[in-house]
Amino acid sequence: MPRTRKTSEAAPGQSTVAERQQQSLAPPPLYQVVMLNDDFTPMEFVVFVIQRFFAKDFESATQIMLKVHQHGRGVCGVYPKDVAATKVEQVMAAARQAGHPLQCVMEAV
């Protein structure tokens, strides 16, 4: 919303002039949600979590899971900070509930 600033006070009977100043808003910083490999969480559970919380189809979720398995980590998505933190918490809660040691973190892009 543009701000209005008075340039001078008007004397009685005179009008004032207002200037509009454009405000530029920077986009919010982005964070990537990264799943980390462990030797205990079943691959099927990792695919399920990626599909459920990151809205990936089976093929995409499987590719991310294989990246996690082969390279030790895989990016599930890139989001603003609050959304990324929520995704990490959802994954961690699902893993705890299922009894798996799956780890998920967020990193600044």
Image: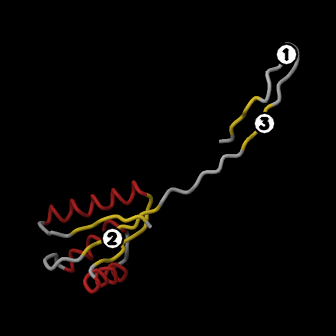
Image quadrant where residue 16 sits: top right
- C-alpha separation, residue under disc 2 versus residue under disc 3: 47 Å
The one nearer the camera, 20 or 58, is 20
Query: In the picture provided, is 10 more to the left or to the right than 67?
Result: right
Residue that appears at 34% across and 84% down: 63
Disc 1 to disc 3, C-alpha distance: 18 Å
Kind of residue indicated by mark 1: Ala
Which element carries disc 2, helix, strand or loop?
Answer: strand
Which residue occupies the extreme bottom position in the image?
70
Residue 11 badge: 1
User: Residue 71 appears at what percent x and percent y?
Assistant: 29, 84
Residue at coordinates 83% horizontally, 19% vertically from top-left?
10
Disc 1 + disc 3, Cβ < 8 Å = no
**Coloring scheme of the render?**
secondary structure
Q: Farthest residue toward the right? A: 13
Measure how far apart labels 2 and 1 are at the Cα level: 62 Å
Q: Nearer the viewer, mark 2 or mark 1?
A: 1
- Residue designated by label 2: 34
**In the picture shown, does residue 5 fall above or below 30?**
above
Q: Earlier in the sequence, mark 2 or mark 3?
A: 3
Taking the spot 27% from the left edge, 86% from the top edge, the residue there is 70
Say which quadrant the N terminus sits in.
Answer: top right
The one nearer the camera, 22 or 83, is 22
Residue marked by disc 3: 19
Which of the image's four quarters has the C terminus?
bottom left
Kindly check if marks 2 and 1 are in contact, taking CB atoms under 8 A apart as contact. no
- Mark 3 lies on a secondary structure that is strand
Q: Amino acid at mark 2?
A: Val
Q: Is residue 40 left or right of residue 81?
A: left
